[in-house]
Amino acid sequence: MQAAMRTIRNFGGITNSYTFLVELNMDATEKIKAGFWIRFSAIFIDTIIVYTITSILVIIAQYFNYYIPFELTFIIIALLYSIIFLGLKNFTIGKWFCGLIVQKKGGGNQLVY
């Protein structure tokens, strides 16, 4: 049985070739595009996770008398976090917690970089 798709809102920008979907039921027969607040929640959760990891690394470095700039470390960890999770599972922890997955617009499962 083919999955039915309902478009709520078209969005542009960098994410134009990908669709953020939220599954409505367990058999995944109907999927809709996620709205602003569910995406914002997922990004907020991911930011808290990355911020926590960065803070722990900076505190450990300070304990051993090393200086690591927080902002640069945050950016590097955020990039690695996104690339690793999106590349392996097509979602980050925040997206998983909110029930979102990332798919290509054509319906494929693999992201192409």
Image (spheres, helix red, strand yellow):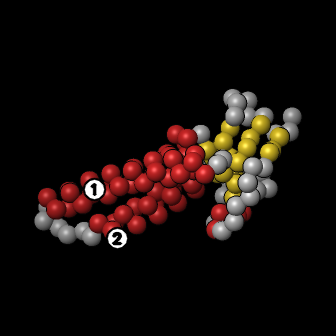
What kind of residue is marked 1?
Answer: Ser
Extreme residue toward the right, this view: 1
Residue 23 pos. (x, y %): 68, 38
Residue drawn at the location 74% of the way across and 58% of the way down: 10
Tell me the SS state at disc 2: helix
Residue 16 pos. (x, y %): 70, 64
Would you say residue 39 is visible in this rendering? Answer: yes
Q: Residues within 10 Å of mark 2 (few under 14, many from 20)?
A: few
Q: Residues within 10 Å of mark 1 (few under 14, many from 20)?
A: some
State the mark number for residue 55. Answer: 1
34 and 83: which is toward the camera: 34
Residue drawn at the location 70% of the way across and 61% of the way down: 11
The residue identified by callout 2 is 72
Quadrant of the rendered image containing residue 6: top right
Is residue 25 placed above or below 2 in the rendered structure? Answer: above
Give the side of residue 93 with respect to residue 108, left or right. Answer: left
- Quadrant containing the C terminus is bottom right
107 and 5: which is toward the camera: 5
State the mark number for residue 39. Answer: none
What kind of residue is marked 2?
Answer: Leu
Residue 72 pos. (x, y %): 34, 70
Mark sitting earlier along the chain (2/1):
1
Is residue 50 placed above or below 27 in the rendered structure? Answer: below
Would you say residue 112 is visible in this rendering? Answer: no
- Quadrant containing the N terminus is top right
Residue 94 pos. (x, y %): 50, 46
Asked if the residues shown at circle 2 and circle 1 are in contact, with their CB atoms under 8 angstroms apart, the answer is: no
